[in-house]
Structures are given as structure tokens and as C-alpha cells.
Image: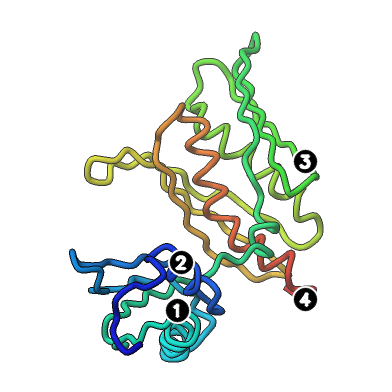
Amino acid sequence: MTSDALPTGPLLLEQLIYQVRGVQAARLITDSQGQINEIHVVGTARRNPKQIVRDIESILYVRGGVRLDYRKISLVQVAERDTTAARRRLQLLDVMTSALEAGTRVEVRLALQERRFEGASTGKSGGETSRSLLAAAATIEALNRAIGARGSFRLERLQRQPLGELDTFLTHLSFVLEGSLEALLGVSIVREDEATAAARAVLDAANRRVERLLSDPNP
């Protein structure tokens, strides 16, 4: 057969396309006569795009009986998530605020897979220290417990900043290791209470450095 009609049906041909190495998703678009107008494919970035297209042409012809012009195949390649790096990212579990006689205490809990790390910060009643700043300081303490002797994080500035229609926290951290100083920036949209948003901004700034620390034996 030399036409691009669908003798076996579009769903079966899509299943053939899924067998090509590197294909993550596929969709056939046909006209009223059952002719293929377009094939849209999402593929991994690990393979050469021309090879993926050639493999799709071959499997449709050999196993589906459809000879197809390669120009009807639209391929988009996406980067795959690094699940190893994701396992090295700290997650925010809790931000807890409690009132004390003399002020406010904010506690933060972070998780790295099954491990837990806690930090806390206390401010006096009527002082200038806000709940957001206390949450940021508590997150720094938890971060430093997580990385141990690999260095230390330091909070330089926390600022609530409108960004267009968004309300955000911006944070500037320093990472200190053997006398060297590295500047880190993070941002978080204020979707929940301000203490949680501030903690997320600190974590956003620190997590990329944490990934490198935990993956490199000589950071």
C-alpha cells in the first residue's frame, strides 16, 4: 500500500508510533476521507530528531502499511526531568507560628527524602521582626542543619515586592564555604500566609546550591 489512508485505524497507528524509542506522546489528525493530514509527536531530547521521524516513517510503513511523507510529522522534543536531582531537593513540610508571652516563635520543617530538619526563630512583641523574617531565619537554620559541615547559608535580605499583578517575596542569601562567598537569589509568590511564602523564597534560593552540595563530594 502506498497511500496514507488508515487501513488499521488511527488508534492502532498511534500505538505503533508509541513503540518508537524516544516517543512520549502521539496524535494523528485525519481528514473526512481518512487520510492523514498531520501527526503530532512529543519526544525525548535524548535522541536525534531526524532519527525519531525516520523510525516513525518506517514502523508505519512496515507494520501499519502506510507510506507517509515525513513532512506531515511534527515533532516537539522536551527535556526529561532529572529525578536524581529531584531527590536531592529539600521540600518545605511545615511553617508553624506560635505566640509567646514575650513575642512570636516561627518553626520550619524541611524534608530530604525520609530525613527531617527543623529550624526556629523568635522575635519580641512589638519589635520590627515580622513573621516573614522569622520564617526566613528559621528556614536558614533548618538548611544549615541539612548540609552540616558542607558550608553555611546566611540571610542577607528579605523583601516583599510587587511584580506586575503578583505579590512576591525576594530573598538574597550568601553561601559561605572555606572563606568564599556566593550570592544566591530566590523568589516566591505570596499565595498563602506570608511566613510560608518567605520560607519558600529562601528555599528557592538555596535548593540549587543544595543539589550541587549533595551530588559533588568536593563542593
User: Residue 27 lies in what quarter of the image?
Assistant: bottom left
How far is the residue under mark 4 from the one under mark 2? 51 Å
Question: Which residue is under mark 4?
Answer: 218
Mark 3 touching mark 1, by CB under 8 A? Answer: no
At a point 69% along the width and 64% down the height, the residue shown is: 84
Q: Residues within 10 Å of mark 2 (few under 14, many from 20)?
A: few
Query: Above or below — where is 136 with respect to 53?
Result: above
- Disc number placed over residue 35 in the picture, else none: none
* Color scheme of the displayed model: rainbow
Mark 4 touching mark 2, by CB under 8 A? Answer: no
How far is the residue under mark 1 from the one under mark 4? 53 Å
- Disc number placed over residue 12 in the picture, else none: 2
Question: Which residue is under mark 1?
Answer: 64
Amino acid bearing label 1:
Gly
Instruction: Point out the residue furthest to the left here.
Output: 32
Amino acid bearing label 2:
Leu
| First-in-chain label (3 vs 1) | 1
User: Residue 42 lies in what quarter of the image?
Assistant: bottom left
Q: Position of residue 64 (x, y in %)?
A: 45, 79
Q: In what element is the residue under mark 3?
A: strand
At a point 77% along the width and 76% down the height, the residue shown is: 218
Q: Give the number of callouts.
A: 4
Question: Which residue is under mark 3?
Answer: 116
Mark 1 touching mark 2, by CB under 8 A? Answer: yes
Amino acid bearing label 3:
Arg
Q: Is residue 8 visible?
A: yes
Q: Is residue 176 visible?
A: no
Q: Position of residue 131 (x, y in %)?
A: 52, 27
